Structure formats: C-alpha cells, structure tokens
Image: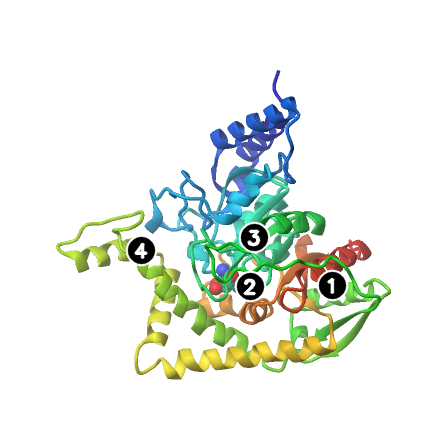
Amino acid sequence: MKGQIKEKIAGCIGKIKQADIKIHSFLEIFEHRAIEKAEQLDEKVKNGDKQGRLFGLPVAIKDNIVIKGERATCGSKILEGFISPYDAEVVKRLEREDAVIIGRTNMDEFAFGSSTETSAWGVTRNPVNPEFVPGGSSGGSAASVAAGFVPVALGSDTGGSIRQPASFCGVCGFKPSYGAVSRYGLVAFGSSLDQIGPFAGNVRDIKKIFEVIRGRDEKDETSVEFEPVYALKEKVVCGIPKEYLNCSEKVKSAVKKTIEQLPKNFEVVEISLPHTEYAVGVYYIIAPSEASSNLARFDGIRYGRRIDGSDLIDGYFKTRGSGFGDEVKRRIMLGTFALSSGYYDAYYLKAQKVRAVIKRDFDIAFKKVDLIIGPTSPVIAFKIGEITDPLSMYLQDIFTIPANLAGIPAISIPCGRGEMGLPVGFQIMAARFNDGFLLEAAEKIEEAISYE
Ligand code: GLN
C-alpha cells in the first residue's frame, strides 16, 4: 500500500505536471528526490519516529537557492549545466524538519526584474489571469503558491522580489530583517540587501516557515540569533507615510478600505518618510554595484557554461557575452561604472550616504509608530510584454526598496482586487528584528479584513 505522505506528494507532483504547462512556475520538478523523501517520511510514521515541524509539507524553492545534487541556474544560461555541490542553509533547515522539496521555480535572470519576463527559460504567467505577469523576480515561487501547487515556497528579496510578486499573485510574502535568515547558498545579488523569505497562502504558514529557517548560521557572518516575540501591544500605532499614497486609484482605494477595517486596537496616524523619492535612485546604484562584483565569478571556468576563446580574455568575453541576458549586462555595466575610480565618490559613496539618510527616516518614524503600512506596489499586475523600458520597470519598486535599504522586516498580504480581479497587496513594515511582532500584527490584520 502507498504511504499517506507518498500519496500526497505524488498528487502534488501530478497536479503540477498537468497544470503548470499554462503557468510555467516550475523550471524543474524533483520527482525522484521528493518521492524518496516521502517514502522516508512514511517509514517514520510506521516506526513511530519523531516527526519534524514541517512533516510532509511540500515546498518550492527559487532557482537561486542551491540544493545539493540539483541544478540551479538563477534563470540564466550562464549557469546551464551547473549542479550544486552543497545545500543552502535554508534548504538544510527545511529538510531537517521533514519538509519535502518539490522543485525549483522560475525567476528573472539573477533576480534582476519585477515581472519574471527576463528568465532565459521563458516567462511565468500570473495564475489569476495568465495574460498578466506574476511580478518578480520570485514570480515562479509566488505563482506556484497562488496556483495551489504548493502551500509554501521560498524566494529572495533584494528590492521587493518577494513582496511585489506576492502582491501581484494574491498571496502572502515576507522579507525578514536583514540578518534574520542565513544567506549561505543563496546566489548573491546585492549582498547588503538580499534576504531569503517565504511565500504562503496565509500568515500562519509564513510564521511556521520563518521559525524553521531563521537564526544564526556560522557560514553567514551577517546572520544573527534573536528570539522573535510573537506578541502585540495593547495599542498598536500604525503610520501611513504620506509619500506612499502616490499610487494608482484602485490600489489606493483597496489600501484605504483595509485601513478602515484594521482591528480596533490599531490606531492609524499619518507620518512622513521624507527621503522616499531617493530610494529608487540609491538602490539602482548600490544593487548593480554589488551585483557587478558578485557576478564576476561567472567566468566560464568555475561554474556552468564555458565557451572557449582564442585566449583567456576572449573566453571570458564569449562566455559572458552569450551567457548573460540584456538586463544582466545592463546591471553589470551600471555597477562597474558606478564603482570605477573617478566615479566612485560621485555615485557609490554618495548613494551610501543617502542610504543612511533613508534608514534614519525609518529610525525616526519607529520612535513614534510600531508599524508602517501602505501599498506594496503602486500598481497591480500588468500585461506580459506591456512594460519594455527599464526605467518604468525600476520605478515599480518605490515602496519595497526602502525596507531593503534599511534592513527592516516587511510583509505583503492580499487586501483587495483591482481591474479584472487582479490582486492588490498591503505592505506592513516594522523596526529591525521586530519580525515576530510584525507577523503577529499581520495575522491580526489578515483576520480583520475582508474584500470582494
Ligand atoms: N525589481 C528589483 C530589481 O530589479 C528587485 C529585485 C529583487 O528584489 N531581487 O532589482
């Protein structure tokens, strides 16, 4: 007789195989690995062994988080054929608690993007309406949860890549405080901004995953041990930044309705984060600078694709020229330029100074309020192919980038619907390492609100 877990996992895989043709949320299903794990778990049940906290839970993993013995491409041709020799710390922690890794999900190439259209392996579609983008860069993970293929998935967020696709697909997506989750085994994009976090259908599941993946890991020196406090205060003061109401009418009205429905002990006050307008500019100096240096390792020698040239330099040119897509090349050029001697002070150093000012806006705000609330994205999902110029795409990140620059935790939960039933996301932020408080509040807000 088939064990129960094996049956459940086989069912989950069957559903993806049949229905993901339309969505393309997965790049690969780890059928063999998942079934083998399920069999082990059924054996545990039979023997009455201790069961992990995520026993039998199917999880999807973004293609930039490595799994031992499996491929990882970051949505790029340059990593074609690369097989990871080790596990990311988050993968280890999930498997230790008996989660079942189902497969790897599609993403914008190297996580540069807001629509999952720049993957070398084709676009992912929004399960709510397949003519629209799922958001990005973790669009595959968001779509895999929204389509009901898996209850939870992991993504990475450098400037909004968990929260924005969560908002576009109508699921929850959480970017923890910088340092809360180990980045060991996450292919680096902007090392001072990157965080791994979960997607799920509800905040309770987000908490469950966060509890398993968080905490100090000696392999990531920026990770810290802290005990999240999952408790609320008697009165929770929420600040709505006036700069965050500059968004589309549908988004604004969904956010306003949500604010009206907040639990009784939540008080709302208007605040200001006066340097919000500089966030996108600062991010698009710092993130490409860090990326240009992180991506130097893809040289055709150490990982994945290799195209031999007439000499070493020619080999680099050929490999990188053919392996990277346009957006990746654009970011590398932007970053290399900003870091080059003569321009370093004018761009990179200046951006770091403005980053400190933006962070200070939050420090000041959190002296007065417990939470900062507002829209996750100024818009709802757009059509595939609709946005073609990079600048318009970059401007999408205006409300999500500040949390990365400040290192604070932020979550997006669904709060309404706009045109054609496309979801709107509500963003909630808290002070650094108040992740427990934030998740507790998000759960209360999720409970209190209703929408058509
Ligand atoms: N859309 C942003 C960018 O293109 C954020 C990406 C991310 O968070 N990985 O850089």
Question: Which residue type carries mark 3?
Answer: Pro
Helix, strand or loop at label 2? It is loop
Q: Nearer the viewer, residue 239 or 195?
A: 195
For marks 1 and 3, give the CA distance: 19 Å
Query: For disc 2, does the CB lie below 8 Å from ligand 1?
Result: no
- What mark, if any, has residue 72 been given in the picture? none
Question: Which residue type carries mark 1?
Answer: Ala
Helix, strand or loop at label 1? It is helix
Q: Nearer the viewer, mark 4 or mark 3?
A: 4
For marks 1 and 2, give the CA distance: 29 Å
Residue 308 visible in this rendered orientation of the protein: yes
Which residue position holds label 4?
298
For marks 3 and 2, give the CA distance: 25 Å
- N-terminal of the pair, mark 1 or mark 4, is 1
Count of numbered circles on the image: 4
Residue at the extreme right? 264
Residue 107 against residue 368 in the figure, above or below = above
For marks 4 and 3, give the CA distance: 28 Å
The part of the image, by quadrant, that contains residue 10 is: top right
Q: Nearer the viewer, mark 1 or mark 2?
A: 2
Q: Nearer the viewer, residue 314 or 65?
A: 65
Is the residue marked by circle 4 packed among few (<14), some (14-19), or many (20+) residues within 10 Å? some
Which residue position holds label 1?
254
Which residue position holds label 2?
178
Q: Nearer the viewer, mark 3 or mark 2?
A: 2
Which residue position holds label 3?
134
Q: Residue at x 39, y 84 (%)?
A: 346
Q: Residue at x 66, y 61 (%)?
A: 435
297 to the left or right of 98: left
Residue 50 against residue 267 in the figure, above or below = above
Helix, strand or loop at label 3? It is loop
- N-terminal of the pair, mark 3 or mark 2, is 3
